[in-house]
Amino acid sequence: MSDSNDASSGLSRRKLIGAAGLGALAAGAGAGGGYAVGRQDEPSIAGVPDPDAMPIPFEGVHQAGIVTPAQDRLYFVALDLTTEERGDLISLLEDWTAAARQMTQGNDVGEFGAVSGSPYAPPEDTGEALGLPPSGLTITVGFGRGMFVDAEGKARFGLDGKLPDRLKELPAFSGDELDPALCDGDLAIQACANDPQVAVHAVRNLVRIAFGRASVRYSQMGFGRTSSTSTAQVTARNLFGFKDGTANIKVEDEKDVERFVWVHEDDGPDWLVGGSYLVSRKINMRIEIWDREPLEGQENIIGRTKGSGGPRSGGDEFEKLDFTQKDDRGAPVIDMKSHVRLAHPDFNKGAKLLRRGYNFVDGSDGLGQLSAGLFFLAYQRDPETQFVQIQRSLAGLQKDLLNEYIVHVGSGLFACPPGVGRKGFWGEALFA
Amino acid sequence: MSDSNDASSGLSRRKLIGAAGLGALAAGAGAGGGYAVGRQDEPSIAGVPDPDAMPIPFEGVHQAGIVTPAQDRLYFVALDLTTEERGDLISLLEDWTAAARQMTQGNDVGEFGAVSGSPYAPPEDTGEALGLPPSGLTITVGFGRGMFVDAEGKARFGLDGKLPDRLKELPAFSGDELDPALCDGDLAIQACANDPQVAVHAVRNLVRIAFGRASVRYSQMGFGRTSSTSTAQVTARNLFGFKDGTANIKVEDEKDVERFVWVHEDDGPDWLVGGSYLVSRKINMRIEIWDREPLEGQENIIGRTKGSGGPRSGGDEFEKLDFTQKDDRGAPVIDMKSHVRLAHPDFNKGAKLLRRGYNFVDGSDGLGQLSAGLFFLAYQRDPETQFVQIQRSLAGLQKDLLNEYIVHVGSGLFACPPGVGRKGFWGEALFA
């Protein structure tokens, strides 16, 4: 499988689309070609490309899925390595890279894909994305601390000296109720797409490829991106009904991206330059309790209005927050313990994050309440001075007013290697 | 709340959209108006209506969400009544109807909605759908046996003599591994939409409205509709990678819809005429085992090819199945125990169903395997001669070959009342 390291290889899923679907997939074929408006089952509006259906380039200096404008759906998975062989880890990363090249461009996994192989062998591709366009799929991998060292701190896979200093375990935060089964992992895969079936297909096939080398630790579906990562995107709302991520780093702000997202040469280690650190946090929301809070209480807790998302101190969504403004009684209009204030760069030594979180609903708990919340994902250059700094400001019942309504139950920290070119594989420099 | 029984009432969510979103929501405003192509955060392609964003009429002889072309996303919830007062049940159904009228047309719940009410009261609407278009939302309710009679068979809510004969408990099927926490319920709500956030918002607000009268028993998210209910839709694929529902009843086949979906006058009871029975089954799929089955084995189990979905006996997807065709060795080309044969009307006294199921992924189980499968939903005129007839043909390891790879863990049967007009409420005739 590691032979097919070529983005143009593989069977196009669209070749298999029947007559009913052809109308909707008009015009061009290759990356950037003409995925027409509408789902495959809808009448085509000829010639109008559907941005949600298009492929996103896999190759690049950085991995896709970080500054890529956030897609609508997420499937995230953390895995543990079940091998101690260096060769197995290398071949796994090679195989994953090859499969990701294919799937992100809308192709089946493998040489023969879902239905063109031997009838006497299990298909190389599981097939549920047949006929679906690339749908903006990105696949982003991260390496957990556990890939580098075992519980005793002994190097694994011959990766002595390769563990980044900054890939420390996250500290305990006040109020955390972490479930170890929802934390950490040797490897993480973030699959984002505009069609959940495409994201699920990607993760499922990567997990299948890992058989005998790595197995799933936990996984999470998400929908309705909660942060905009591009100025072209409207800020989406979280399940508290508020716009989330108004002040997020935007891809168009190249200076912030350079300063806060990518690992620099002088940060080290060498193999991670151009990469980034991913912090994941599964945050359960106490939805039913929140819904009983008066509107003004909700807005005070957040520090913004619910309708426009503008600051409590006035103005529209993107107006600067005025923390000095006082009400008639001399109290700050933006509460000292509001979420927006405590998380603000002004009170965190300038720290910013590139957030890329998703809402989730896992169903209902045994008490009839929603099992729902925010699967928080944030990319950064240095976890200690960014996520940890900000989370220390927020965590604890004496701090962020929001803490009465949320609880962190899962946590992970992963070093995401830089992108790959036409021939390489994820993390190749680790093994050089 | 039951005063606002008027589809035109309520605040439009779109009024709150800021400048960034306005471009995408061009032209008209009312139901059937101009929801432009693209999500709100994408550049508008002026004047081209986006079918995925449009509202679906709430009023009608039948409830929406049954023969409505299947939307992409599902949020399903079953509730138990926590009151024994007839007046509470009536007011709940009135309140739900009023809220559904508003939400399906893209409006906030209540008189003042998410952000226009008193700052000192909890908002009437939870707000996470602010700025989102109606997205094809339909809300469909069903009544479980438990709403009519208690465990001893005694009538509840003064509904003596109203229990439909056909609303029997489903029989036990061979191989079932039902979890009581995922079965039954006094009431069911099926919310379907092209945006999961819109479906989640609808269920959450209906559950909130029910507080003190009904509470959640279980709920289920679904994606990637597995059946096409319209000839205009391409048949989607289930998580086994096969097209699912090729032979489903299509809304365009009016004779089948009339014969197999709607309760007729001579079926009774009177209050249910124009309604339908909904069978729900949560079916876990043994994904990892399936993925190890050779292609020919998979196709033999299903009885169709994986690529086109055509019958093993030849032809394209919609070719008639030829159960008489034999191979060189005299064996039937479509296996006698294949899924498609055992489920076929020819072997089930002509029985057909209107299926409307969705794929689900709940995450991973403790063993690193996908918790995933099919949330099967089927509408019918008579459960005994339709779902039960077909399921009896399929159930059991000696029958459908597919049973090695699936297990039914949840089950429900609900009587769905007919639709409502401009003034009525769901199930009103029950209380006349």
Image: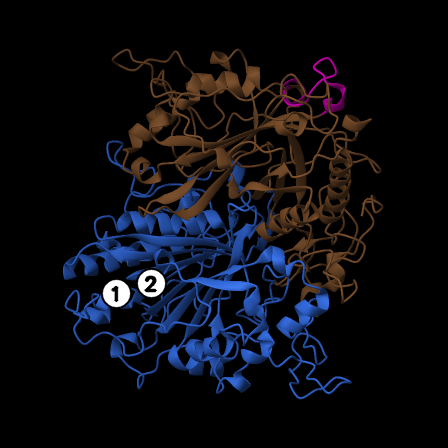
Chain colours: A brown, B blue
User: On screen, A189 above or below B56?
Assistant: above
Q: In the rendered image, which quarter is residue A64 located in?
A: top right
Q: Type of residue at label 2?
A: Asp
Please give left or right for residue B125 compared with residue A388 in the image. left
User: On screen, A205 above or below B351?
Assistant: above
Q: Chain of mark 2?
A: B
Q: In the rendered image, which quarter is residue A156 located in?
A: top right
Residue B349: x %, y % from top left: 48, 87
Q: Which mark is residue B184?
A: 2
* Marks 1 and 2, the one that precedes in the sequence: 1
Q: In the rendered image, which quarter is residue A402 located in?
A: top left
Q: Chain of mark 1?
A: B
In the structure shown, which secondary structural element does the residue marked by tag 1 occupy?
Answer: helix
Q: Give yes or no for residue A124 being in the magenta stretch.
A: no
As measured in the structure, the alpha-carbon distance from the residue carrying label 1 to the one carrying label 2 is 8 Å
Q: Which residues are magenta?
A: A256-274
Q: Can residue B58 be seen here?
A: yes
Pointer 1 residue: B146
User: Is label 1 in contact with label 2 (beta carbons under 8 Å)?
Assistant: yes
**Front residue (pair B139, A46):** B139
